[in-house]
Image: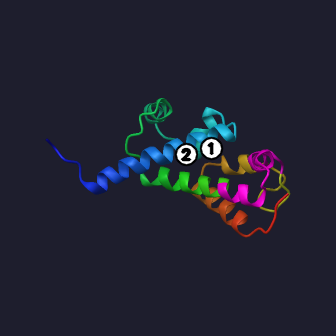
Amino acid sequence: MMSIPTDQLSREELSGSALRAFFKLAARWDLSGLQQRTLLGGPPDASYEAWVRGAYEHIDDDVLIRISYLLGIYKALHILLPDSIQADGWIRRPNMAPMFAGNTVLEFLCRGGLSELRDVRSYLDGQDAIT
């Protein structure tokens, strides 16, 4: 019987947990398939389709980092806006903060870069309250 190294097993478990959490978040935010793929960094069709079906093979560091930022954004929103409907809807409302320039946060996030994810996470971490 072949054994799986502990670090590989942990990585496989982490990949599955991260993707399950991402797809729950995507459902809460009502993200389209295109938006999901963009936020995940544009994975190949075969990988994304496998993930949607629940085949959570090892995912690379970029995808894990992206999911981590998104989960941090989700958590921050639910701390700052205790009403779930407001918290989940915040990304779809136009935002006049300078970095969003009247666009929705989702539009900003869907530019596709890690920097946008990091910037939104940092923005929320610096807020006492949001509207």
User: Residue 21 — which label?
Assistant: 2
Seen in the picture, residue 31 relative to 61 is either above or below; the reply is above
Decide whether residue 88 is among the magenta residues: yes
Residue 20 horizontal/vertical position (percent) = 51, 42
Seen in the picture, residue 79 relative to 83 is either above or below; the reply is below
The answer to which quarter of the image holds residue 61 is: bottom left
Decide whether residue 76 is among the magenta residues: yes
**Residue range of the region highlighted in magenta in the rendering:** 75-94
In terms of secondary structure, where does tag 1 sit?
A: helix
Tally the marks. 2
Residue shown at the point (83%, 54%) measured from the top left: 95
Residue 2 horizontal/vertical position (percent) = 16, 44
Residue 18 placement, left or right of 120:
left
The answer to which quarter of the image holds residue 24 is: top right
User: Residue 78 — which label?
Assistant: none
Tag 1 and tag 2, C-beta contact below 8 Å: yes
* Label 2 crowd bin: few (<14), some (14–19), many (20+), radius 10 Å: some
Name of the residue lying farthest toward the left: 1
In terms of secondary structure, where does tag 2 sit?
A: helix
* Label 1 crowd bin: few (<14), some (14–19), many (20+), radius 10 Å: some
Residue 55 horizontal/vertical position (percent) = 41, 34
Label 1 – label 2 distance at C-alpha: 6 Å
User: Residue 25 — which label?
Assistant: 1
Residue shown at the point (82%, 47%) measured from the top left: 93
Question: Which quadrant is the C terminus positioned in?
Answer: bottom right
Observer-nearest of 116 and 50: 50
Residue 11 horizontal/vertical position (percent) = 36, 52
Overall secondary structure of the magenta stretch?
A: helix
